[in-house]
Amino acid sequence: MDLDLDKPALTGEDYRTLKELGEAHRAIRAELSKRIIGQDEVVEQVLTAFFAGGHVLLLGVPGLGKTLLIRSLAEILGLRFNRIQFTPDLMPSDITGSDVLASEGSERSFKFLGGPIFTNFILADEINRTPPKTQAAMLEAMEENCVTVAGHSYPLPRPFFVMATQNPIEQEGTYLLPAAALDRFLFTVVVDYPTQADELAMLFHTTSKFELPVARLLDEERVRRMLEVVRRINMRDQTLKYAVDLVRATRPSESRDLMVKDMVECGGSPRATQALILGAKARAALEGRDEATPRDVRSIAMPALHHRVLTNFHADADNVNSRDIVRKLVKEVPRPAGDEPHVEKVVRDGLGRKFMRWLFGEPQQAAGTAAS
């Protein structure tokens, strides 16, 4: 199969935009570092998802700077920002807006009044605390880039980026996002506690100084142009096939991996492959490169796949989660010819015995021990 993907698809203007994006990426990181201490991988994954045209679900306890991150990013990019606090009594119209009765002279008519979703950046804080009906309104906007009210569709601004958060600790009074809803997010990013050094630096900045200003580096038009260029980043046939093989390896019906067959209820859909491709292209573009490589695919495999791999009770019994499975597949799925070697460090603590046997093979029988 020849997909004819090896030929450059970028024009001279595209290359100028690509160079501008690479320079802007470094400048954005420098500006964000004025307010966000540490969390380098989280920042990089959020930027990758944004320029890939997707949305992000952040998993982490409160107080780790998630709101500050997206608000600062909106300021730097010159885009509008709104925060929506999801609560059990939040209604779909509180997000999308509604028709209101307006008077014009002696005539009265209904006029649509848009809600907070009509902006560029949305922080959907604790999205799992609102009922499924309200979640569905948000998810429709994420997928269709429009909202429907009283039978009329209203387009959302471009770019449109949602960063939703979930508190993984408290589950009382929450409505867990179903698998179909999780699949709408390009990435799911785990936000962990900062290191001791980062926490000390953060405390120094936040308790002894006012919030530092950040410079506006871009605007809507330039951001839209960059988003279009990301889609045209080159990707060779072998890299595309590698991404497909990686996703197919997560499906129990198609995988050759015994752990996947026994411990995975459902693997990634074609949307997972799209997430890998777009994420890899965005990662390459942010570095100013015109071609996405297998290394780019691997670099975003975890945030793109782990929320799309659903484990079963066998995995729960052996203390294996979807991140363990994705990590193993990234290591074992055959890579394209000529791809650079990559050594993975496997953390063994806390994994079940069955998983350890699959990962490292059966233990050798001690000499002199009789076979049972």
Image: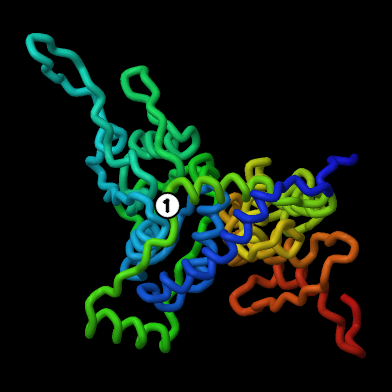
Residue at (90% x, 78% y) in the render: 371
Q: Position of residue 366 (x, y in %)?
A: 86, 87
User: Circle 1 sits on which residue?
Assistant: 219
Quadrant of the rendered image containing residue 318: bottom right
Name above or below for residue 29 compared with residue 146: below
In the depicted view, which residue is nearer to us: 242 or 19?
19
Amino acid carrying mark 1 in the image:
Asp
Relative to 153, residue 225 above or below:
below
Would you say residue 117 is visible in this rendering?
yes
Q: Residue at x 23, y 82 (%)?
A: 209
Q: Is residue 199 left or right of residue 22?
A: left
**Above or below for 102 versus 193:** above
Q: Quadrant of residue 217?
A: bottom left
Can you say whether 97 is above or below 185 in the image? above
Task: Identify the residue at image location x=32%, y=51%.
Answer: 81
- On the image, the x and y values in percent for residue 84 come to 29, 48
Q: How is the image coloured?
A: rainbow
